Image (spheres, grey):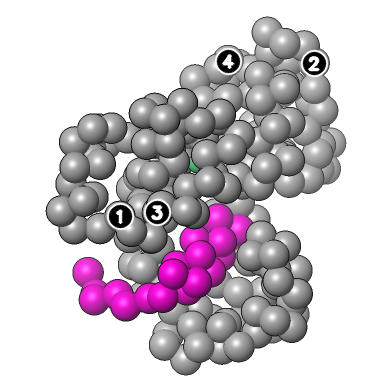
Amino acid sequence: MVSIKLTRQQEDYINAIYELQDTFGIAKIVLLSKILKYSPGAINDELKRLEGKGYIERIPYSGLRLTSIGFDAAKITVKKHRISEAFLFKILDVPWEKCHLLSSEIEHSISGELEMYFMKKIGEKGTCPHGNSFNIEEDKDDIRALDAEPNKNYLVKRISYEESTTLMLMKIYGIMPGKKIKIISKTMDTVTIENENGIFPLEGIYALSVRLNE
Ligand SMILES: [Zn+2]
């Protein structure tokens, strides 16, 4: 593991880029600026710094990707994010759909000895409330709802894209980690699922964010 020195803001950038890459395969600037709540022009300077330090690479006409150094940084920063989400959810009873946003208040301070105490309290091998593993390497082998097979039953493993509207909608639909769903039908970018709450079409972002296990 390389030594990683990032500012709080850079940690937010790495986490957001990781989340987008995990969901879409690439981080598009327009979605990144939406997550970070700055205009695409305003995030450019920081992206240049991260590129200069070798954390990210630009893919012409499509977006950004973490380099292997960037991925090593994400292992640390995403873990801190997910530990603090789990802490907010399990210990402070923060609502499921709010943990992602509120964790930014505390996640940057979690490291070293303090991280050890957090882990002791919430468990070493955990996931965030949205099912995303503390160890990002463990999130590779799941199935996107869009790639699942019709007429087959699955368990929801995680919601990879933790944006508030997505989380709120998944909560209303009852699509949360550990819940059963059945794939009813599919088109190019929409998958229709059935679960104990009813029948729901998942389009675009949602069809990519819901990750399943058999
Ligand atoms: Zn989460």
Task: Check disc 4 and give the amino acid type.
Answer: Lys
State which quarter of the image contains the N terminus: bottom left
Q: Residue at 28%, 32% (x, y): give it.
A: 122
Task: Check disc 1 and give the amino acid type.
Answer: Ile
Q: Secondary structure at mark 4?
A: strand
The residue nearer to you, when weighing 42 against 161, is 42
Q: Residue furthest bottom?
A: 52
Badge 2 is on which residue? 199
Q: Residue at 64%, 65% (x, y): give it.
A: 36
Span shown in magenta = 1-21
- Mark whose residue sits in front, 3 or 2: 3
**Residue 108 pos. (x, y %):** 38, 60
Q: Is residue 155 above or below residue 57?
A: above
Q: Give how far apart the Cα atoms at labels 1 and 3 are.
A: 6 Å
**Relative to residue 146, is residue 199 drawn left or right?**
right
Badge 4 is on which residue? 180
**Relative to residue 170, is residue 101 drawn left or right?**
left
